[in-house]
């Protein structure tokens, strides 16, 4: 059992750390306040080859896998969760295509993500179907050699920047069906007739990458753009299972960034003839957070290795869900405690702690809430997929 990254991943970590410090850190506050897409950072990531980390080499990526992308996102998220989200979006929409899609789909859509020529987005949630995915109402009806899609998707990260979308829709005759086989995944291009970006959300945090609606009105999707098989919901959804450590990495990085920032502050802030850092109560809070961050990292790196080994089917879900649940909750805790360490100053935009605080909460909601993850973990124990005897 080796807990060290190999030489290639260590080199990637160092590259990403340097980019995060030199390029991302100086822009983090401006991105949040302007709420404008940071194209300059996208260009930096593209030029550094970071957009294809999880994409195979034969599609133009580097083949660094889920673990490579996890390492990169952790470094970037220390300073900006918006920038980390940009890297995450290289895997979220491409995952179902890489796992279940045809070679043709991969060449037409995934390869463009690796090169930076195209951007994708993932469309699963709907106004009446968030955690209750089977409640979705978007329909796809067969019409000759195509499918006609109608519906509204919401809370779509990167919706305004994407060139294509991974879209889930009901393909069964009964739109009220809750059978997993009633849902199919499609690749939908933004430029097609009937595809429209709707209203954009006003978010508390993670500003700069737009989140909003995708409106589908009589959109004709060729049959070859079906991801996997018709009714192949479960195969396509394996992509979400494999995403757990990538989302967790955003939480780890945020927690690290918040703790480093607060630690530097308390070492300098004088109070009662000494510094805040000299007080045992502050030291204990720092120690507890540092321990929880390291525990989250171990859970997350293990899950990333599992995902790269193809261990993202049902029996491995508890391990994957654990890292997402724990790391994102640690991020919320760390952002809260670190803001408190700064007192009134931490609540002000003069310091990064208020930005960490706003950004952290999103992580416990996206791609399966903390409550959904707890349900999956519990189910794994009850079914003895996770068992110790």
Image (cartoon, rainbow, N blue to C red):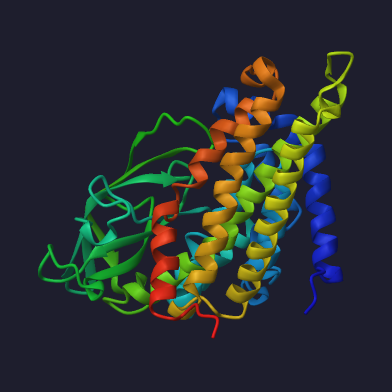
Quarter of image, res 159:
top left
| Residue plotted at (70% across, 26% down) | 341
Q: What percent of the width, then of the height, locates residue 362?
A: 49, 41
Look at the image and tell me in which quarter the N terminus lies: bottom right
Q: Identify which residue, 298 or 121, lies in the foreground.
A: 298
Q: Identify which residue, 384 or 198, lies in the foreground.
A: 384
Q: Residue furthest left?
A: 174
Query: Is 350 rendered above or below residue 53?
Result: above
| Residue plotted at (61% across, 69% down) | 303
Q: Identify which residue, 193 or 100, lies in the foreground.
A: 100
Q: What percent of the width, then of the height, locates residue 329?
A: 55, 47
Q: Residue furthest bottom?
A: 389
Would you say 19 lies left or right of 295 here?
Answer: right
Would you say 68 lies left or right of 389 here?
Answer: right
Q: Residue furthest right?
A: 273
Q: What percent of the width, then of the height, locates residue 169?
A: 26, 62
Quarter of image, res 21:
top right
Q: Residue furthest front?
A: 280
Count of marks, rendered view: 0
Query: Is 105 rendered above or below residue 195?
Result: below
| Residue plotted at (84% across, 54% down) | 14
Quarter of image, res 148:
bottom left
| Residue plotted at (56% across, 80% down) | 310
Residue 114 at least partly seen? yes
Would you say 199 lies left or right of 369 here?
Answer: left
Q: Identify which residue, 268 or 129, lies in the foreground.
A: 268
Q: What percent of the width, then of the height, locates residue 194?
A: 26, 49
Look at the image and tell me in which quarter the C terminus lies: bottom right
Residue 118 at least partly seen? no
């Amino acid at each position: 059992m080796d807990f060290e990254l190999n030489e290639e991943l260590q080199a990637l970590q160092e590259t990403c750390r340097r980019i995060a410090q030199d390029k991302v850190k100086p822009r983090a506050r401006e991105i949040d306040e302007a709420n404008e897409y940071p194209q300059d950072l996208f260009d930096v990531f593209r030029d550094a080859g970071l957009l294809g980390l999880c994409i195979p080499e034969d599609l133009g990526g580097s083949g660094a896998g889920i673990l490579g992308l996890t390492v990169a996102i952790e470094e970037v998220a220390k300073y900006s969760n918006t920038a980390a989200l940009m890297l995450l979006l290289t895997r979220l929409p491409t995952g179902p295509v890489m796992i279940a899609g045809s070679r043709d789909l991969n060449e037409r859509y995934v390869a463009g993500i690796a090169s930076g020529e195209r951007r994708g987005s993932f469309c699963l949630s709907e106004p009446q179907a968030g955690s209750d995915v089977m409640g979705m109402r978007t329909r796809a009806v067969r019409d000759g050699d195509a499918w006609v899609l109608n519906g509204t998707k919401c809370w779509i990260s990167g919706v305004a920047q994407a060139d294509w979308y991974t879209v889930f829709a009901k393909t069964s005759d009964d739109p009220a069906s809750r059978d997993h086989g009633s849902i199919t995944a499609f690749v939908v291009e933004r430029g097609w007739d009937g595809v429209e970006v709707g209203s954009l959300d006003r978010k508390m945090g993670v500003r700069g990458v737009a989140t909003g609606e995708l409106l589908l009105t009589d959109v004709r999707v060729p049959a070859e753009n079906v991801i996997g098989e018709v009714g192949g919901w479960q195969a396509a959804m394996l992509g979400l299972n494999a995403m757990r450590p990538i989302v967790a990495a955003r939480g780890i990085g945020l927690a690290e960034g918040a703790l480093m920032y607060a630690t530097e502050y308390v070492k300098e802030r004088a109070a009662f003839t000494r510094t805040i850092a000299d007080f045992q109560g502050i030291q204990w809070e720092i120690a507890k957070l540092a321990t929880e961050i390291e525990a989250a990292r171990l859970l997350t790196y293990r899950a990333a290795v599992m995902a790269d080994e193809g261990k993202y089917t049902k029996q491995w879900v508890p391990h994957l869900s654990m890292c997402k649940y724990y790391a994102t909750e640690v991020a919320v805790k760390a952002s809260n405690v670190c803001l408190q360490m700064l007192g009134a100053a931490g609540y002000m935009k003069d310091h990064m702690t208020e930005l960490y605080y706003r950004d952290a909460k999103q992580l416990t909601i996206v791609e399966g809430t903390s409550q959904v993850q707890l349900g999956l973990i519990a189910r794994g124990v009850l079914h003895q997929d996770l068992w110790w005897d």
